[in-house]
Amino acid sequence: MVELVEIDDADFQAWKQMAVDEYFTEKVRAGNDGPDSPDHSRIEFESLLPYGRLTKNNYIFSIVDEKQGSRKVGILWYAADAPDLPRDTLFLYDIRIDEGMRGKGYGKATMLLLEQRAKELGKKRIALHVFAHNERAHRLYEELGYRPTNIMMAKEL
């Protein structure tokens, strides 16, 4: 159903700006609005990808529907050697299915393809972060066998 195609420069730049903006927005929505700012989110993003799409051990792909003439339906970013994780763990930084394409199985198909890629890289585990309010993502990950490993909680006063 889907295949992963190396992202080109134009798509990378558009995705990067959208990803930084959305990351900041999601952090604020989750209540993490302390000293953070859009600039801080950009700096954090750029520290993870100092060489952009060419950063070593990071893989950024356009997700394409191979049955619809290779129509782009989303973006996938994962790292083979993420900071602070065991070497046998692949970290999923971002999976983004375009708004109009959600609910059609692209997310699940991409996650299953990611499992294959992880095995090819010799990984035994995939880790990811999901915001608590992203219920759709929670359902997908749980359906695929992901389980919570850490839960941070907060109470507004």
Image (cartoon, helix red, strand yellow):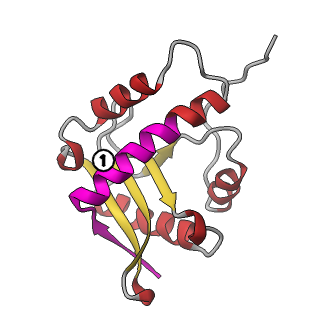
State left or right for residue 88 relative to residue 54: right
Say whether residue 135 is magenta: no
Identify the magenta region.
1-23
Residue in the picture at 38% in, 43% down = 17
The amino acid on which the numbered mark 1 sits, given as a three-letter code, is Ala
Say whether residue 20 is magenta: yes
Residue in the picture at 36% in, 58% down = 118
- Give percent across and percent down for residue 145: 62, 57
Prevailing SS of the magenta stretch: helix
Q: Judge whether residue 92 can be spotted in this image.
A: no
Residue in the picture at 61% in, 61% down = 144
| Residue 150 to residue 69: above or below | above
- Give percent across and percent down for residue 124: 41, 52
Under circle 1, the secondary element is loop
The residue at which mark 1 appears reads as 80
Q: Seen from this angle, which residue lies furthest right?
A: 157
- Give percent across and percent down for residue 96: 49, 57
Q: Nearer the viewer, residue 31 or 100?
A: 100
- Give percent across and percent down for residue 139: 70, 56
State left or right for residue 113 relative to residue 34: left
| Residue 27 to residue 75: above or below | above
Q: Nearer the viewer, residue 134 or 81?
A: 134
Q: Judge whether residue 79 can be spotted in this image.
A: yes
